[in-house]
Structure formats: structure tokens, C-alpha cells
Image: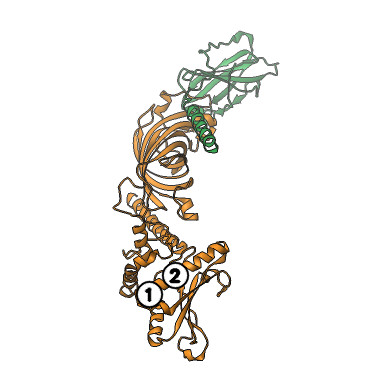
Chain colours: A orange, B green
Amino acid sequence: MIRSLFAAAGLISLVFLTMEGKISAQGNNITETDFTGNTTLEGKISARENNITEADFTENTTLEGGIGTQILFSRDAGVLDFGQRLTPVFSLAAGKWLSPLWGLQLRFNGVSMNGFTIPSAGSPYDPVIEYVTVRPDGSYRHYLRYFSTSLGIKVSLLTLVEGYKENRAWDIIPSVDAGYVRMLSYKGSPAGNYISPGFSVAGKYRISSKMDVQLEARAMLFPGKFDGITSGKRFENNLGVTLGVSYRLGKERFRLKKVNNVAGDVVNEATEVSQVIADTVYIENKVPTDTIFVEVPAKQAPSAGEPFIVASFLFAADENFPRPHQDLQYQAIADYLKRNPDRRIRLDAYADKETGTESYNATLAVARAKNVKNLLVSQYNIDESKLIENAIGVKSRPFDKRVFNRVVLATVLPND
Amino acid sequence: MMKRTINYIIMLLGVVCTLSSCNKDEETFTQYPAPSWTVEPANYNGNMTAVVTVPDNLKRYMQSDDQLAAFVDDGCRGVGILLDGAFYVTIKGSSSEESMVAFRYYSSRNRYMYTTDAFLAFDIDAVLGSTDNPEVLSLHHVTD
């Protein structure tokens, strides 16, 4: 049983890790450490820009405490008035976010529940009746006392849906856990030890940089005999609602950071950029999957007098630095100019007009053209005079598909 | 301002829920002292027999000093004898009367008094239930 729970927890962890990778890859507004352990281009730049040093244990760590009420759903408890089924509950937890998407949580909670028994023919003697008031219909209440310790996995639902945002005011955090429940001997109910899975959903609202208010609903499953009475059901469940606070011990800081390079800043990173691209593409034989393949008449003789596209550089949304793994495009330009030293290349920079104003996209296009030029000059030793920046922005769209227009097209110009 | 209002509302809800869940007073139900039911056999010239028992949900509380009796209106017509989980009641009556008989049951453990509707027509020498299959009474808790 325990082995199965750990296996399930491990599987869930892998799923979340995979989902996290996909979010990063799709959104392209955050960086990541790739699964081979090599830091990607944006990761290095981001880490440097954000001055990330060694991780502090208190980072992304929370302490939570709450009190509230809970209700037991059992075969017989439904006959009790709603108010009589409510019992107090407390919850203490320590949590660690291992990424913006998911984390672990160690929880300690208790303290009481109300059970209920309606005796039937042949019901065995129950010592509980010596301690409680038997109702005229023969039914009686159980006063249960317990403590529970559990370890679980929690997920930031809004990060999953919307992506990571620092200092988000609201969040919804579902979690699953499994743990040990100790039933105490109390008013005739026997002591016992059980394994109990749980599921919870918490709504958090940030009231300060260190503290959240948290409203949480948590369901736990107990074996049917947990109160000493064989109910005939395999499991009985309870639902607890607690209101509490969550306190952040350290800063909320992840290695996943948004890249906000400005045009020109990447020049100083150029040496490192080249090294990283070589590492990830040639050494690991990674195949770029996000490159636009455009039919380029690269083999045509430039003397034909027509301009033609020799390379293209793709960008993520709202990014002015080219995506990684496009070194073949750079190399194509370098090779062409080496063979044709008398030619010049125009860098036509476009933007995706759906995601910004025209003026913003124009600025973005300027930065994109400039960054590509800087990389070609610094990394491929191309004469700066051979490259012409041409920021087009959203004035025209070379491609029908929206994302393809986040691009710089390198066009070989005919000789004058 | 909005933030503060939300905080107050959430905290108020929490306090109300917590306080309500802490109300753990035991329920109380109407209880009675043990009755002293007797019959005046001289007033009646006939009788019938009933073998009855209590419902399953009350059987686990049955004790040897529990009492059960048959009544016509408020007049006691027979007191039961408890034997092997069933009460044997000899119900007294007159040959000419057309009365309806009810039963009352007293649980000594819980000190609760129960009664049935007047569902049984008195019929001389008739028998209700049997040793093997006693009649299960439909009991209502007496609250006044």
C-alpha cells in the first residue's frame, strides 16, 4: 500500500515536471535548465542579469496554520443535523515550492470528528454507548479524536493555466497527499493506526509580501472500520474547511525568470552565446524543432539581380533575442558572405502584430534586427558594413501563420 | 479598501464556522421514571394474548427490567413478561367491548417511554404473534 502511494507520488511528480517543461517551451517567456543539465542560453543570461546566487533553503518555503470546521460523511452520520456534524479542526503545514508550478507539503492536522451509528439487528456491543447519549431511535454519536501527518504534492493552478507571475495576488492550489492517521481512544472509540489519502483545494490571497490568507477544503479517506464500527463501506470520508494564514519564510524566487533583454545588451554575452549553442546543438546532437524552413533560392546566382532570402531567425513572443538552436542560420550567412564578399545582406525584422501596439512592435523589430546583426558581427566575424538593419515591424507580414512573423529574414541584396 | 474588506469577511466566516463547530452539548431527550403498571382482573371476563417485541434498533438496549403493557385508552389491560427477547402479554377485556388496544414500552437503560398507536382490536381468545415470530411493535418516543 505504502509502496503504491510512493509510486503514485513519483509518477505525479514526473507528470508535473514534464508539464512544466512544456509550459516553458511553449511560452518562451521563461527560461529553464534543459533536461540534460546544460543551461540554455536564456538561462545563463537570465541568471546573470538577475544575479542569482546559491539557493537559500528558506526560499519558496512556507509555513501554514489554520483552524476551521469539518464534517464526516458516513453511512449513518447523515441523519444528524448539519450543525451536530461539524467539529473543529486545525492544520499546520510546511511547504516548499520546487518550481512555480508544484511543490511538496508536510502537514499535521486533527483533532476531532463526529461519527454516528444506527444499530441494526445483530449489531455487536459497542462500548461507545456507555459514554454517550443514546437517542430514542437507538442511534448515537461517536466522538472521535485523531491526529494526522501527511506528505503531499501541491500545484499552482493559475501558474498551470496562465504561466508564472511574480507576486500574484490570487492562486488556487490543489494538492494530493497520503499519510498516517492516529485515532485516539476516546469515549469508547478504540485507538488505531491507519493510512489515509487526502485531497485538498486551497484558495490563497496575498495580503503582504510575506503572508497569504488561505481558505482550504480538504477531504480525507478513512477505512470503514476506523471508528471501531464496521460500517459495511470500504471507506468513509470527511471534509474539512480551514481558514488560516500562510507565511513565507524566505523570498519567492525561482530559477525560471523572464528574459527582458534590451537591444545591445546581448553583445557582451556573445562569446558565451556561441559556446552554449555549440554545446547544445553539436555535442548533444539536438535537432531544432522550432525553426522555420523557408524555401530559399540560396544556390541561385546572385548575379540574377533579384534579392533572395538566405536565412531566417525566429523569436519568441515579446522577445528581441533570437531563439536558441538557430546557429545554422548564422552559419549560412557567414558561408555565403565568405563565398560572395561583394554582397550585402539586409536584416528585415518583423513582429507579431497581435501581441502589441504598432509602435511597440516597431521598437521590438529594431531590437531584433540589431541583436541579430550584433551576433553575426561578434560571433561570425562578419563585416558590419555588409549588414543592413531594416525594422519593418507590423507594416507587412511575410507569413500567414502568426508566430512565424516573429522573425528576422536575412535577404541578400543584388549588386548595385 | 477592497483588500481589507475581503480580509474581514474571510476572518468573520472563519470565526463563525469555528465557534459553531465547537458547540458540542449532548442532546437531551424526554425521560421517565420506571412505571408501575398493574391490571384489575376482576373488572374483565375475557382475555387475549399477544407476543410482541421491539424493533431491531432498540433491541441492543433491552434489559431484564424493561416493561411493556397493553392499554385501552389509559386503562392498563395487561403487563408483559419478558422472555428471550419477546414480551408475552395477556390482555384483559370484556366479551362485549370493541376496544382498540395500544402498547407502551419502557426502556430502563435509557429511561425512554415509547407507545404504539391503538392498532389491535380486542378479541377474546385471539393471539397476536407467536414465540417463533413475535409481532414487532411500531414504537414512538413519548415526549410529554
Vertical placement of residue B9 versus B50, above or below: below
Residue A255: x %, y % from top left: 36, 55
Residue A58: x %, y % from top left: 32, 45
Q: Residue at x 70, y 16 (%)?
A: B97
Q: CA distance from mark 1 to mark 2?
A: 11 Å
> Which chain is home to disc 1?
A
* SS at circle 2: helix
Q: Residue at x 55, y 24 (%)?
A: B51
Q: Residue at x 46, y 76 (%)?
A: A388
Q: How many marks?
A: 2
Residue B108 visible to the viewer: yes
Of callouts 1 and 2, the N-terminal one: 2
Residue A80 visible to the viewer: no
Residue, disc 1: A377
A128 with respect to B70 (left or right): left
Circle 2: residue type: Lys
- Classify the position of the C terminus of chain B by image quarter: top right
Circle 1: residue type: Val
Residue A111: x %, y % from top left: 40, 32
Q: Nearer the viewer, residue A258 or A136?
A: A258
> Which chain is home to disc 2?
A
Q: Which mark is residue A370?
A: 2
Q: Nearer the viewer, residue B33 or B4?
A: B4
